[in-house]
Image (cartoon, rainbow, N blue to C red):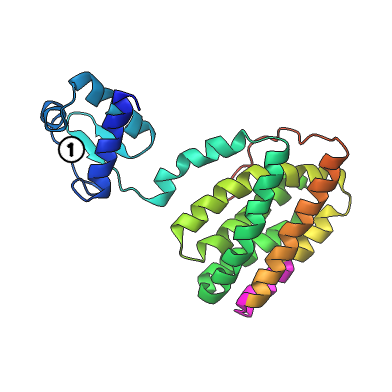
Amino acid sequence: MSLTDKAIARIRRMIREGELPPGSKLPPEQQLAAELGLSRNLMREAVKTLVVARVLEIRRGDGTYVTSLAPGLLLEGLGGAVELLQGDTVLELTEVRRLFEPVATALAAARITDEDLAEVERHLSAMRDARDDVELLIQHDAAFHRAVIRATRNETLATLLEHISGRTLSARAWRGLTDADAAGRTIAEHEAIHQALVARDPGLAQAAALMHVDTTERWLRDHLAEGERIPTAPPVRTVP
């Protein structure tokens, strides 16, 4: 480990062990450097790295603070890394989605509220209306799943799936552009998930979500096996 890495590890340990809890202010740079036996330059480098990682934040004129350490904040960098995955690693990502999303949908079925269901239904209705508009259909497809996963009340799970599902959107958009029957099947699969959520049936919800994810994965495997390449898709806009 470099001296900077050691400094980072020591600050992270202080946070992990509760010496610097979420939202707390770090001691002045000179004081903290002396306490850790580090130079001020090393301390600055360590702080810069932890700021990029969203562990620390610098408030101008006030000092350096530990962030909230919320999952959505700490896992933010995962999205950037996932976007760079290519080829077979995209297939690995669909496998991860297949492992996580059906279980998350089952959890949502057990916890979903009427307000959550109304949001899911709104995006399902918008998907039906956008049957002939692939881009808009995919936007509401993503929003449908976000609404379902939010219903789990599990921020860590929601954040992980947001980043994983986001990278598979290009594959789903590709399928929509090349498969004439994709829109109808996609809507039918989402309707099955919705019906299971309305019934508050975790087992049925998990099965419906698994079938939906598996359909996309099998289609993607078939096309990549033929030597095709997933095109780079533009970022999918978030619909209100």
**Residue at the farthest top position:** 41
**Residue at the farthest front position:** 1
Q: Nearer the viewer, residue 234 or 104?
A: 104
Quadrant of the image occupied by residue 211 = bottom right
Q: Residue at x 70, y 70 (%)?
A: 207
List x then y, in percent, for residue 168.
Answer: 68, 45
Q: Dominant secondary structure of the magenta stretch?
A: helix
> Which contiguous range is marked in magenta?
191-202
Residue 210 versus residue 222 in the image, above or below:
below
Q: Nearer the viewer, residue 191 or 166?
A: 166
Label 1 sits on residue: 26
List x then y, in percent, for residue 50.
Answer: 33, 34
Res. 134 visible in picture: yes
Q: Amino acid at mark 1?
A: Leu
Name the quarter where the N terminus is drawn: top left
The answer to if 69 sits in the magenta stretch is: no
Is residue 46 rendered to the left or right of residue 107?
left
Q: Residue at x 52, y 51 (%)?
A: 160
